[in-house]
């Protein structure tokens, strides 16, 4: 059973993950596959060549990209007894080399380069128009949108969490607590040695 | 049925060697314990003496009006706090005092104890080196 993303071991052979060729290597870094999810890309090769789509999933180990609704084949799913199953389209993965970024200015595919802005920020710049292609927003794994979050009873509010209330002192934490609580300890531990 | 089949499939060739060895296994006289720290000692005749000081006790100050709660809101931004170093502590606390004394002309290099200098850790309850407290 081959799951996407696992390296199949078939009777002693090891599946060779194709290395990104030197010509396509800039393309790999350009897409920065770990953050390419939810990015608009144009497909260059395959049966959907020339179409634009949204990246839904990225498998970095095999340089795979799944584009929503593109490069689909059809299959039956959920067959049980007499019921043949539901006929659904499922996307096949595309290699990074067969996909490029889209310039947001004119919605056409471009070559992209990593450059530094005047502030020192590393950004992707389209070679044709010079427009910066921003990195897509990384979604929270819980699906939480921080701007719309409402604090619960056990949540520290933003101001309390950020407020700096530390007063530097030469006492250790334990000594401070003893002073606060009025604990007096005059006994001392017996001297012990360790090597 | 699925769970049992999976279990039997996994353990059909022998016992589970990776299972934790607890006091529920072995003979009824074999007591390996559950990993607790000692709270006393055995005296003559295998009688157990509990030492009150070895039993951990939580010392918690009064928390009324305490604003921090178990969880942090998602709205709070991620930030970095500079690591607390000995140099930073010195510059924050001791250096201003020394500066003031030098300006007033009463700085005495032989009397550094008044700024918090500790020549030895002997006689202290919480020694910094060698560290004799858990935290």
Image: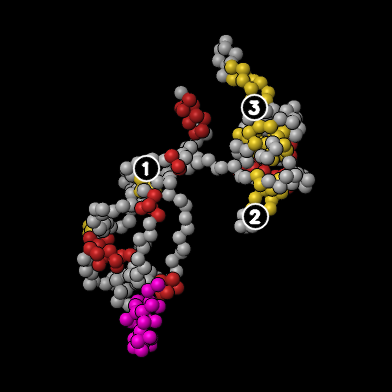
Closest to the camera, between mark 3 and mark 1, is 1
Closest to the observer, A97 or B118: A97
Q: Earlier in the sequence, mark 2 or mark 3?
A: 3
Q: What range of the chain is rendered magenta? A: B92-121
Q: How many marks?
A: 3
Q: Secondary structure at mark 3?
A: loop
Q: Quadrant of residue A54?
A: top right
Residue A122 placement (x, y as % from top left):
64, 53
Residue A117: numbered disc: 2
Residue at which label 1 appears = A151
Q: Residue at x 21, y 69 (%)?
A: A184
On the picture, is A128 further left or further right than A31? Answer: right
Please give the chain letter of the residue carrying mark 2: A
| B34 within the magenta span | no
Q: Which residue is mark 3?
A: A69
N-terminal label among 2 and 1: 2
Residue B58 position within the rendered picture, expressed as x and y whole percent measured from the top left: 27, 56
Mark 2 residue element: loop
To which chain does the residue with label 1 belong?
Answer: A
């Amino acid at each position: 059973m081959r799951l996407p993303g696992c390296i199949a071991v078939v009777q002693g052979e090891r599946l060779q993950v194709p290395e990104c060729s030197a010509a396509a290597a800039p393309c790999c870094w350009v897409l920065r596959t770990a953050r390419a999810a939810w990015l608009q890309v144009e497909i260059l090769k395959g049966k959907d060549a020339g179409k634009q789509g949204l990246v839904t999933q990225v498998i970095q180990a095999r340089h795979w990209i799944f584009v929503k609704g593109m490069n689909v084949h059809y299959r039956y799913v959920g067959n049980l007894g007499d019921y043949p199953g539901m006929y659904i389209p499922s996307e096949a993965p595309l290699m990074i080399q067969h996909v490029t970024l889209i310039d947001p200015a004119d919605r056409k595919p471009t070559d992209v380069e990593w450059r530094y802005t005047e502030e020192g920020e590393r950004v992707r710049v389209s070679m044709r128009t010079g427009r910066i292609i921003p990195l897509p927003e990384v979604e929270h794994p819980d699906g939480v949108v921080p701007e719309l979050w409402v604090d619960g009873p056990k949540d520290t509010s933003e101001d309390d969490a950020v407020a700096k209330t530390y007063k530097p002192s030469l006492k250790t934490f334990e000594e401070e607590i003893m002073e606060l609580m009025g604990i007096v300890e005059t006994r001392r531990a017996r001297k012990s040695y360790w090597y | 049925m699925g769970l049992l089949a999976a279990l039997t499939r996994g353990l059909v060739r022998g016992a589970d060697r990776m299972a934790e060895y607890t006091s529920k296994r072995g003979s009824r006289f074999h007591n390996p314990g559950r990993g607790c720290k000692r709270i006393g000692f055995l005296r003559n005749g295998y009688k157990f003496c509990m030492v009150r000081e070895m039993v951990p006790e939580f010392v918690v100050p009064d928390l009324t009006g305490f604003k921090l709660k178990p969880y942090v809101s998602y709205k709070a931004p991620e930030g970095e706090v500079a690591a607390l170093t000995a140099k930073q502590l010195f510059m924050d606390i001791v250096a201003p005092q020394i500066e003031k004394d030098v300006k007033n002309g009463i700085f005495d290099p032989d009397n550094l104890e008044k700024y918090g200098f500790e020549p030895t850790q002997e006689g202290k309850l919480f020694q910094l080196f060698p560290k004799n407290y858990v935290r």
